[in-house]
Image (cartoon, grey):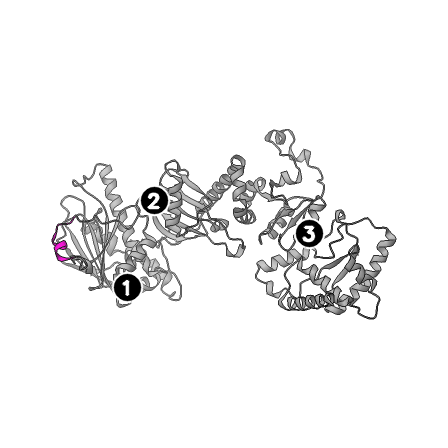
Amino acid sequence: MSLEKGNLSINSENIFPIIKKWLYSDHDIFVREMISNGCDAITKLRKLEIMGEYQFPEGQEFSIQVIANPTKKTLKFLDNGIGMTEEEVKEYINQIAFSGAAAFMEQYKDKATEDQIIGHFGLGFYSAFMVADKVTIETLSYKEGAKAVYWECDGGTEYEMKESDKETVGTEITLYLNEDSYEFSNEYRIREIINKYCSFMPEEIFLVNTDTLGKEDSSVPEEENAQEKEPEAPKPLNDTHPLWTKHPNECTEEEYKEFYRKVFNDYKEPLFWIHLNMDYPFNLKGILYFPKLNTQYDTLEGVIKLYNNQVFIADNIKEVIPEFLMLLKGVIDCPDLPLNVSRSALQNDGFVTKISDYISKKVADKLSGMCKTDRENYEKYWDDINPFIKYGCLKDEKFCEKMGDYILFKNLDDKYLTYKEYVGEPEETEEDQAENPAEETKQEKEPKTIFYVSDRNLQGQYIKMFREAKMDAVYLEHVIDSSFISQLEAKNDGLKFMRIDTDLSKAFKKRTSKKDQKELDSKAEKIQERLRSITGSDKLEVKIQNLKNKAVSSMLTVSEESKRMEDMMIQMGMGRDMGQFKQPGTLILNGQNELVQYVMEHADSEEPADTDLFLEQLYDLAKLGNEPLSPEEMGRFIARSNEIMLKLAK
């Protein structure tokens, strides 16, 4: 063919400046586009061979070669795929995706401030111009009698095209990097990018640095260099058959763990995993790992990597992955996803929602199945996975419906029970439901109160009292539990959760006559007035009650509503602003305790007689059983404790 010059079929001369700056948010992504195009070319040739339209040369091996030349500041991408004819270069390269660029320009010409501009026009090849001043293509089609083509463009709208002397089928693309992009001719930088985007592409990828080609190893003596040595076969940078592409029955436990370590650089073993493998109604494969979660809700963060035909797309795309699954780590490969040109964002449609629902369903099936058939392991994992499951119940109604009967509660004896097991409700079978439709058997449920522990260290005194009274409670010590139990209360009529320090059960109190209790109430009013004067809190309430355990001197109770409000404000990041809303609670003094009796005897005395000292100490001791003291309160508490000990020593 003779030399041909022409203009690219676009209706504006500003297309390349826009591509360079705004086509992709991350400029390094051009490496993925170049390599994935090469993989596509090889895939097409493989299909032609299967259909009998092409025969591979003997010993044919396919690969993508990436050649970095830091001296010339170039980067080459070579594939031995299907190649292109002169007509195909004109169609696929010169026209820039079939005149879609006109609409692209019209839509984005005034949006230079946008972080990311993405169209739907197949502009993957043109991502090269984000980093290159000039791009050349040499390509030879697989078609018999085809002539090789050379194409060149310097980033404007003009191109040159002529016959090439390329002799092998495939395509070679050379990027002449611009001054701001010389980093991409560095072997280590390109290796990093390939590992990021192309670790699991379906064709082998090899990286070559031309600065090291042909150099002898100076660390080896000349006589050793002179000896003939078996050349080491280069190793591809990628794994062309990642674990998720295999059937679960073909994968071993060690392979799952090794894959987890490799992909997430996490050497803590995952608890367990779910292998997704679906061909209908859409193609989806992947592995979701349950890592050992942290104890604080605000520090939970997982990574789910999304792939399209083994090409990395992005981490944690919320349109595909249900929000609560973001706490997991894993990979999902769905070739059917409707991606746009950059392969980095999804078109919002019902299909994506179905994929999200399917993933959520598979996770619920795995967890519920484990609870039913492998209860021992389910209980073993529960402390680690329960924040994730509860978060899922809060965020996903369908997930909540499936998991409702498989939420476990750990009681004071460290025994794990479902809600129905804990409250004593019988499990309803399918036969029961058929014989007794819900509308016929719906009855008024008796109110049910479940006491819970939110901090076993701070509430140790209350736990001891519960055990002595042969009462039970459950451990709900995660920040998310406050929202979760509110949801349970809303879904179950008559159900009420109460912290064990919100109220004193009758089981803890000694029977007291009305006359004696009236006298105790009178003393409590005087002590309350005195304590309010000492602390400066006009909202503090004081009650005196006779408790069975004489060793307990004082306790502080705070209403459940106040604690829920406090938890909610902490989750909303407003914990520091709680001072003006925080309720001081109710101080319960045990009328059976000798120290409290001393305070009651001197409540009317005008002389302090250590009453104020003891009373303030009793209040702080009660607060310590509820929450940590502030630095100022702790300072006064320590000084007061020393003062009391000195009095005892005299």
Going from N to C along the chain, the mark reached first, 3 or 1, is: 1
**Left or right: residue 335 compared with residue 96:** right
Disc assigned to residue 242: 2
Q: In the image, which residues are magenta?
A: 221-229
Q: Can residue 451 be seen from the camera position used here? A: yes
Q: Residues within 10 Å of mark 3 (few under 14, many from 20)?
A: many
Q: Is residue 524 above or below residue 282?
A: below
Q: Which residue is mark 1?
A: 183
Which of the two marks, 3 or 1, is nearer to us in this view? Answer: 3
Q: Secondary structure at mark 2?
A: loop
Q: Which x, y percent locates residue 388?
A: 52, 48
Q: Residue furthest front?
A: 650
Q: Quadrant of residue 185?
A: bottom left
Amino acid residing under circle 2: Pro
CB within 8 Å, label 2 to label 1: no
Q: Which residue is mark 3?
A: 462
Q: Nearer the viewer, residue 25 or 74?
A: 74
Q: Residues within 10 Å of mark 2 (few under 14, many from 20)?
A: some
Q: Nearer the viewer, residue 602 or 628?
A: 602
Q: Quadrant of residue 606?
A: bottom right
Q: Secondary structure at mark 1?
A: helix
- Quarter of the image with the N terminus in it: bottom left
Gap in angstroms between the C-alphas marked 2 and 1:
29 Å
Q: Which x, y percent locates residue 47?
A: 25, 40
Going from N to C along the chain, the mark reached first, 2 or 1, is: 1
Amino acid residing under circle 3: Tyr
